[in-house]
Each structure stands twice: as structure tokens, then as C-alpha cells.
Amino acid sequence: MRTWLVFIGASVVVWLSVLSLAQALPRELSHVSAIVNAGFVAAGCVGSILVRRHLARKNRTDDPDSVEPGLAQQARADAFGVGLVILALFGLYMFLTLQFANGVIVYGLMGLSAVAFWIRYSFLRSRVS
């Protein structure tokens, strides 16, 4: 859990730095903020993969004899439909309000997708044990 907290804390610091950079830049250099945001997203993806692999090795959840890979796969499959519904609602919201760059809602929906996965995973794990 500590590894995730460090990763999330660093992400929040970088995200706040990107926001302050976007406010400080003149209009002529507004594209720099988009480039930095893209780098932030790419680094977050790589960091998330590395943290997941580290925790899998540490907890030995990636062993072939463990029940956890199967549970994770089932939870991913079940959360896929939820993700599609979330995306449909997001598209409907954007269509109705004509706000195409509302990042707060995007991050909120991404968070809901992650929560749906972990809730489903915990239900499946409680059925097994």
C-alpha cells in the first residue's frame, strides 16, 4: 500500500505543477501545457505498470497456482460493461452540455471505473475464501 501512496502523492504534485504551469504561460505557449500533460499521462501509465508488477512480485500474486490471477481476470471482464456504461453517460453529458474539455468529469469517471473493478474483485475474492 505504501508504494501506491508514494506514486499517487507524486502524481498529485506533478499534476498541480502542470496546472500552475498552464496558468503562468502566455497564450502563445499554451501548447506547452498540452505536451506536458501528455508526458504526465504517459509517465503515469508506465508508473502504474511498474507499481503493479512490483506488488505482484512482492505479494506473489502472479504465481500460476494462485487463485488471484483468475479473480483479477474475471473482475476485469465484469468491469468492462460498467466502463462502457460510464463512457456512454460521459458522452451523453458532453453532448447535452456542449463542454468538450471538462477534465474533472473525465478523471471522476476514470476513478469510478477503478472503484468498480476493486469492488467486483473483493466480491469475487470473498466468494472463493
Image (spheres, helix red, strand yellow):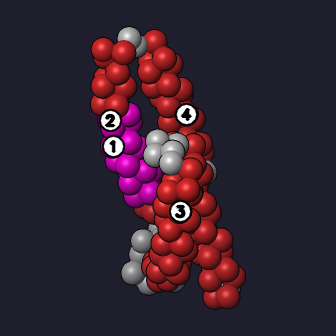
Tell me the mark number nearer the camera, choosing from 4 and 3: 3
| Residues under numbered marks 1 and 2 in contact, where contact means CB atoms less than 8 Å apart | yes
Residue linked to disc 2: 39
Name which of mark 2 and mark 4 comes first in the sequence: 4
Q: Secondary structure at mark 3?
A: helix
Q: Is residue 52 left or right of residue 8?
A: left
Locate residue 22: give its quadrant. Answer: top left
Near mark 1 (Cα within 10 A), the count class, few <14, some 14-19 or many ≥20, is: few
Amino acid type, mark 3: Leu
Q: Nearer the viewer, residue 83 or 59?
A: 83
| Residues under numbered marks 4 and 1 in contact, where contact means CB atoms less than 8 Å apart | no
| Residues under numbered marks 2 and 4 in contact, where contact means CB atoms less than 8 Å apart | no
The residue sitting at 46% across, 42% down in the picture is 101
Q: Which mark is residue 79?
A: none
Near mark 2 (Cα within 10 A), the count class, few <14, some 14-19 or many ≥20, is: few
Residue linked to disc 1: 42
Q: Nearer the viewer, residue 103 or 80?
A: 103
| Residues under numbered marks 1 and 3 in contact, where contact means CB atoms less than 8 Å apart | no
Compared with 79, 96 (above or below) is above
| Quarter of the image where the C terminus is located | bottom right
Amino acid type, mark 4: Val
Q: Which residues are magenta?
A: 37-53
Locate residue 117: give its quadrant. Answer: bottom right
Name which of mark 4 and mark 1 comes first in the sequence: 4
- Kindly report the distance in space between the C-alpha atoms of the residues bearing marks 4 and 3: 29 Å
- Kindly report the distance in space between the C-alpha atoms of the residues bearing marks 4 and 1: 15 Å
Name which of mark 2 and mark 3 comes first in the sequence: 2
78 in the magenta segment: no
Amino acid type, mark 2: Gly
The residue sitting at 55% across, 33% down in the picture is 12
- Kindly report the distance in space between the C-alpha atoms of the residues bearing marks 2 and 3: 28 Å
Q: Which mark is residue 12?
A: 4
